[in-house]
Each structure stands twice: as structure tokens, then as C-alpha cells.
Image (cartoon, helix red, strand yellow):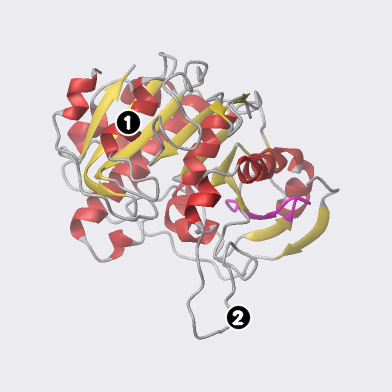
Amino acid sequence: MTNDLLTRRGVLALAAGALFAPPILRAARAQEETPIILRPDIDGVDPRYRAYALAGDFIVPTAPYKISSGLSEVAVFFPRGVTSARPIVFSHGALSSPMTYRELISQWVSQGYVVLAPQHDDAIIEQGPTIRKTNVREPSEWPISALLQDPSAWDKRVQSCRACLDIADMVEGFTGVKLDLSRPVVAGHGYGAYIAMTLLGASVTGPDGKPMSFHDPRFFSGIFMSPQGPGVMGLTDGSWKDLAAPGLFLVGENDLDFTGQPYEVKAKAYQLSHPGYKHLGVLKGGTANSFSGQMARSNEGEARLFEAIRAMTTAFVRAYADYDQAAFKDMTTQFFQRMSLGAVTEYKR
């Protein structure tokens, strides 16, 4: 894909969108109610698309386990009725939390995967990045700029994601599910996408001008939703040259967040990454808030976009974590563009 394919679209107006210690053995058990798997039909699509986009065969507990890795609290979402599963480590967006993405995470769990989602320090909790006022009537401040430019914060997030693989034995003990660590997936949204890209080999430049690398070769592939392009958070045009792992990049046409980057710039993360097994989906009319699934509950257009997000991310994990040949073929054609009736435009490298 050339730059022209993206820059033909107009520039969008700016909008706001969306350490080390031994593991602590504690967990909050999931609620025991068994939810019903709902599979509303999708008319006029291939059965494979339906299988990707709708809930899978596994029951998702109504609440995750909460385990401390010693670095952060980790929400462990796991499917019932499985003895072995591949893990997806998920990093949430700035000022968000794992539960914000419950709809998307539940989709992956219903397909048979275990999702490990650390709650980062910038989550909206009492210990989060608020600056408490002396006068409680005044609003709290959210130092977003400082948060996104702080290498120590980047490192804390990275270490929290790495720790999710380090505590595999503990997770297995609480869930009874054996984790297959041969091809772990790392996924993230917004700030979390930044962390996922660096874990897979994207390099950044620190405030002192020196290169920084957070690469962890244990992660095999990544899903980057609303990623950052060059020009922010230490990213340059050369940051992605060593990101050779399989990657799915998803951006929305109206995808503007705290970085102020329009989607054409965000998509450069895809364009500048090492070629091979790279996929880009541009969501028609999508925003930074399209990825959690919360807007899909009451908006028909957002529901269709979220359907495409569920389908593409599920197929990507099947293709690169499970080595599913049918899913790989679908990822390397215009399958999702056709089945979504153009809700997503696909590019491959």
C-alpha cells in the first residue's frame, strides 16, 4: 500500500478519544452464574465470517480472576470447558481498564483463548494518574502529555505485560487451563497498542536521544488497535524496521485520540513495519471508541464496525497462533472487506 492510498482521505479535525517483586498469591474468584451464549445470525455472509464474528463455543465467566503478578493486578479471562489454551496478553488504553474492553475480550475467550490483561498504573482507579486537589470541589487533573512521554511509564507497562507470561504456572493453578506458550499473542488499544508494538520489536528514542528497545521474543504476533505513527512517544520513521512479527493494525477514519494523530499517520505504523505477514484494516467512520464494543450496543453503524473488529481479530489469532490454514487464507484476501460490505478496507504487506 502506498501513502496515496491513505492520504486521499481528508485530514480529520482533532478530537480526544479514548518493580520487580515475587508474585503475590491472591485471586478473586469469578462469579459462578453461567451466561447464555447468544449467536444472533448475520445475513448474507460466508459461514466462516459468521464463525469469526460471533461468540464461539465456550462459556465466558461473568467476571475474571484477579491475580497479582507482583507488578500489577492481572485480570484473567478464561473459557470454561477447555484443558489447554493459547494466551493473549492485552494492554488497555490510557486512563482505561481491562473491563472497558470486556466485549472484545469475551469474544476471544469464547473462541477458546485465555486473555491476561494487566491493569496499568494509569487506569482510572484511586491510585491512578489523578492529581488530587486540596479543595475537593475542584476537578482532578489528568497529566496525559506527561504520561505518554514518560519512558519509566512505558517500561512499567512493558514489564507488566511480560510478567503475564512469567506467572503462567500460577494462572494454570487457579484456572485449571494449561497455557500453550509456543505462540503467545500480544494485543493493545491506544497506549496499549504502543506497548504491544514495542514488545514485538518497534524501537523508540528516549528524551535523551538514545534508542530504547523493549522487545520480548516470546511474543509471536500482535494486534494493534488505534496505534501511534511516527512523531510521538519516541517513535520515528525507522521505529518499525525490526518489527518482523505478524501484525494486525486497525485504525478508524475518525480515529483521533490523545496523540492528535489522524488515522493516515497512525497507519504509517503498518506502512513502515518490516514487510511480511502484516495486515491493515481501516474502519469506515470508526473512532478510537469503536474498539471496546460499548458503542455497538446502541448504534447500528458501530455494531457493524465492531462485528468486523471481532471477525478480523479472531481470524488473525487463529491464523498466527493456531496456524489455521483457512483463517490464514482469509487474512490474505479481501475476505473481511467483502463480508463487512466495505465497513473495513483491507491492505496486506
Disc 2 element? loop
Viewer-nearest residue: 62 or 252: 252
Number of the label disc, if any, that sits on residue 267: 1
Q: Is residue 138 above or below residue 68?
A: below
Q: Please state which amino acid type lies under the numbered disc 1.
A: Ala
Residue for badge 2: 134
User: Measured from the top left, where is residue 314 in percent x and y?
Assistant: 42, 38
Viewer-nearest residue: 209 or 246: 209
Q: Are marks 2 and 1 in contact (CB under 8 Å)?
A: no
User: Measured from the top left, where is residue 67 in percent x and y?
Assistant: 72, 57
Viewer-nearest residue: 201 or 177: 201
Quadrant (top left/top right/bottom left/bottom right) for the C terminus = top left
Disc 1 element? loop
Graded by Cα atoms within 10 Å as few (under 14), some (14 to 19) or many (20 or more), the crowding at tag 1 reads many
Q: Which residues are magenta?
A: 68-81
User: Measured from the top left, where is residue 156 in percent x and y?
Assistant: 67, 45
Q: Please state which amino acid type lies under the numbered disc 2.
A: Thr
Q: Is residue 75 magenta?
A: yes
The reply to whether residue 276 is visible in this rendering is yes
Q: Is residue 76 magenta?
A: yes
| Residue furthest to the top | 275
Residue occupying the point 25% across, 18% down: 1
